[in-house]
Amino acid sequence: MNKTLAIVQEWAGFEEQNPAGSIEDFCRDYLKRQLVQENERDMPDHAPDLSCRYALTKVINRLSRLWMFFTMTEMKPLGLTSFDEFIFLLTLQRSEPIRKKDLIYMHFIEISSGILVIDRLIKKGLLDEKTDDHDKRSKMVTITAKGRKVVKDGHEALDTVYYELYGDMPESAMMECLDNLKPLLDRITQKWNKLKKFEPAFKDV
């Protein structure tokens, strides 16, 4: 096929799927699809999709582990022993008070592990606990003044992590990563919520 005609057809297909896409977006999309096709040719007929899924899973897992290591290096001096503690505090600062179960499930944590996180925060004086006025069987948690101070210091610690890890990565590249991963996150979140019979009552932080 004539090369000009081939690229025009590729553009037409891209534009149909991405009406607002730019030429730069098209070029990135085209190159990524070519790379996937090359990888598939190197794999057995039954496994091309699995190889791609494995590679993505490995990258996400490794990024999570590395990011958590460097983040907790900055967070530990604040008295925090896990990033979940900071996320719980941040959520309560913006949406207090919250039932324990809601706070735990909205961050994709099992109840037993989440209760341990909350108990540690209460023991440190960063959270308070009270009975739910609408359901005496449930407990609500709120953030204390000491907890708010930790959130403020935590943001400063995160600024250091962002600077060291993201470096000079363009914001456009970060937005592209977010756009590409959001559908995957939404899909898996729906499966989690269905499995736990959980209806989020608050927006994510």
Image (cartoon, rainbow, N blue to C red):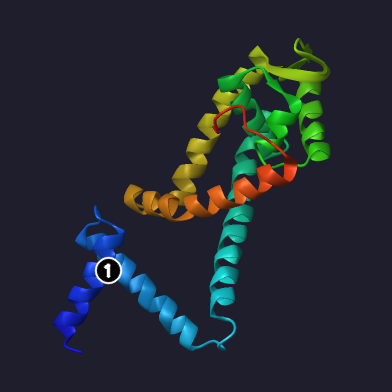
The answer to whether 176 is drawn above or below residue 144 in the figure is: below
Quarter assignment of residue 132 = top right
Estimate the x, y position of residue 66 in percent, counting from the top left: 60, 54
Q: Nearer the viewer, residue 137 or 108?
A: 137
Residue 79 visible in the displayed image: no
Describe residue 1's horizontal placement relative to residue 91 as left or right.
left
Residue where numbered disc 1 is placed: 13
Task: Kindly give the residue lying farthest to the top in the view shown.
Answer: 133
Please tell me which residue is depicted at 79% across the width and 19% down the height of the picture. Answer: 139
Q: Nearer the viewer, residue 16 or 200?
A: 16
The answer to whether 205 is drawn above or below residue 133 in the figure is: below
Describe residue 123's horizontal placement relative to residue 71 as left or right.
right
Quarter assignment of residue 76 = top right
Describe residue 158's horizontal placement relative to residue 107 as left or right.
left
The amino acid type of the residue labelled 1 equals Gly
Please tell me which residue is depicted at 76% across the width and 10% down the height of the picture. Answer: 133
